[in-house]
Structure formats: structure tokens, C-alpha cells
Amino acid sequence: MVDERPPKKITLADEALSLGVYAERAYLDYAISVVKGRALPEVADGQKPVQRRILYSMNEMGLRADAKPVKSARVVGDVLGKFHPHGDQSAYDALVRLAQDFSLRYPLIDGQGNFGSRDGDGAAAMRYTEARLTKIA
């Protein structure tokens, strides 16, 4: 038996919306906020939030240019634990990009080990690489 009642109405700020219209608007608003907040670099410094969190975490850990490099896994773990509770691979990929001299005009991380090449070779696993901030960072 088919239900012939009209669709449920949801009232938001004195505006009656059908459930379908409300869901479409809510999803679109959320999608736009995600793209603005995570995927697009900030105009002021050109950094994505995960990159900014990596640099902040490394500064807090004392990994400046004159410090001894530490394992990238330790940096990624600190970032995940304190600032960026998402996947470790995405955080490591962002760290690798900040260390590649062919990705950025001025690399912000001094990477020790295999951080990939222009030919498309990937970086070594985070347990094999080390990192510290550069002087410019």
C-alpha cells in the first residue's frame, strides 16, 4: 500500500522545507565547509590545516634547524595525538610534501632519507625518514 500523505515538513527559521530540500541544503553546506576548511590552502600562507599543524607541532617539539632530526613517525604521532585526529598516512604525505625541494620553492622541513623524487617515486615509510624544520620555517 502506497502512503499518499504529503512529505514531512521541517521548519527552519520560519521557513517550511520538505525533508529532501533540507537534506540537500544541509549536505551542500557541509560539503562546502569541508572543502574550504580542509582541502583548499589558506590565502594568507598557502598552507592547508594539516601542514600548519605539522609545522606547529614540530616547533613545539623543538625541532628547529639547529636541532637533531627525529623520526618522521614521531612527528606524525604527535600531530595525530594532539592536533589532527585523522589518518596517519595523510599527515605523513603532507610532511613529505613540505620536505620536497621540487614541490615547494622553499622547503619548510629538512628531510633526512628518501622523500621521493620528481619521477614519481614515493617516499620511504615514515619509520625510515627523519625530519626537522628549516631555517625559513
Image: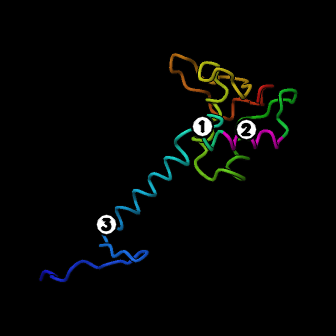
Tag 2 or tag 3, which sits nearer the N-term? 3
- The residue singled out by tag 3 in the image is 21
Badge 3 amino acid: Val
- Spot occupied by residue 30 in the image (x, y as percentages of width and height): 46, 57
Asked if residue 123 lies left or right of residue 57, the reply is left
Residue drawn 57% across the image and 41% down it: 90
Answer above or below: position of 75 versus 11.
above
- In three-dimensional space, the C-alpha distance between marks 1 and 2, rounded to whole angstroms, equals 17 Å
Indicate whether residue 56 is drawn in magenta: yes
What is the CA distance from the residue labelled 3 to the residue labelled 1?
33 Å
Q: Nearer the viewer, residue 110 or 56?
A: 56
Q: Look at label 1 and name its amino acid.
A: Val
Start-end of magenta stretch: 52-61
Task: Indicate whether 14 appears above or below 69.
Answer: below
Front position in the image: 32 or 123: 32
- From the image, which quarter does the C terminus lie in? top right
Circle 3 crowding by C-alpha within 10 Å: few under 14, some 14–19, many from 20: few
Mark 2 lies on residue: 55
Q: Quadrant of the N terminus?
A: bottom left
**Residue tagged 1:** 43
Drawn side of residue 13 relative to residue 88, left or right:
left
> Dominant secondary structure of the magenta stretch?
helix
